[in-house]
Amino acid sequence: MALNIILLGPPGAGKGTQASRLVEDAGMVQLSTGDMLRAAVKAGTPVGLQAKAVMEAGELVSDEIVNALIDETLDRLSPDQGVIFDGYPRTAGQAASLDGLLGRHGRKLDHVIELDVDEDALVDRISGRFSCARCSTPYHDRYNQPEVAGVCDLCGSTEFKRRPDDNAETVRTRLAEYRAKTAPILPIYEARGLVRHVDGMAPIEKVGAAIDALLER
Ligand SMILES: [Zn+2]
């Protein structure tokens, strides 16, 4: 029986990495509404054409269109393909629609997996990052400085770069946005006993193993 999961996690928790791994290793399909929308528009499906018209008019794509899009996408999957929902649902209404859509395809939601982070530790981890401008070797202000200050260990370059969004304020803002986005749906799934927590601060392999254990792979 194919598993259907929602994967949640704030920026920096490694959600993308884990989703890619489940796609590659477990043959699951990652459904993000943005990707589905672009694909449907490109393929010129009935829903894609409808969405294109709405977007060209500068309007937001309605829940009806998003639901039709998911319906259309689920139609194309084989019954043994598991699904990872990414960035959907966002509202209580969408959560209710998802149950109906899954049910119509003989599926049900099995798990809502949230990658938890320690926000202060995450800010600390991200805000000190920098890298060699020539060879991209990663460094960190506090945890991983070059052996000789200002000189790359690997290539000897003295030029370094920092991503402008790797600063404490931006990280805090993104975490707050994540909390606001998940606030409408987490309590719904918590009440149904579907939410599983995985420590997103652990090393990537450990996070992966914890997810696999939940999925009993
Ligand atoms: Zn270098």
Image: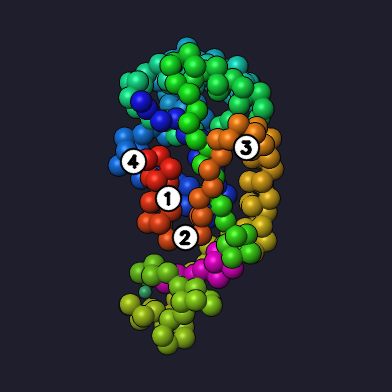
CB-based contact (under 8 Å), mark 1 and mark 2: yes
Disc 4 secondary structure class: loop
> Residue 157, image x and y in percent?
38, 78
Tell me where residue 137 sits by quadrant: bottom left
Disc 1 secondary structure class: helix
> Which residue is labeled 4 in the image?
217
Disc 4 crowd rating (10 Å Cα; few below 14, some 14-19, many 20+) is: few
CB-based contact (under 8 Å), mark 4 and mark 2: no
Q: Earlier in the sequence, mark 4 or mark 2?
A: 2
Disc 3 crowd rating (10 Å Cα; few below 14, some 14-19, many 20+) is: few
Q: Locate residue 210 relative to residue 116 in the image: left or right.
A: left
Amino acid under disc 2: Ala
> Which residue is labeled 2 in the image?
202
Foreground label between 2 and 3: 3
Amino acid under disc 4: Arg
> Residue 184, image x and y in percent?
69, 35
> Residue 140, image x and y in percent?
49, 73
Q: Earlier in the sequence, mark 1 or mark 2?
A: 2
> Which residue is labeled 1 in the image?
210
Per the image, is 131 magenta?
yes
Ligand 1 neighbours mark 1 (CB distance < 8 Å): no
Residue sitting at 61 percent across and 22 percent down?
A: 96
* Region of the chain picked out in magenta, as a range: 124-132
> Between marks 2 and 3, how big is the CA–CA gap?
23 Å
> Which residue is labeled 3 in the image?
190
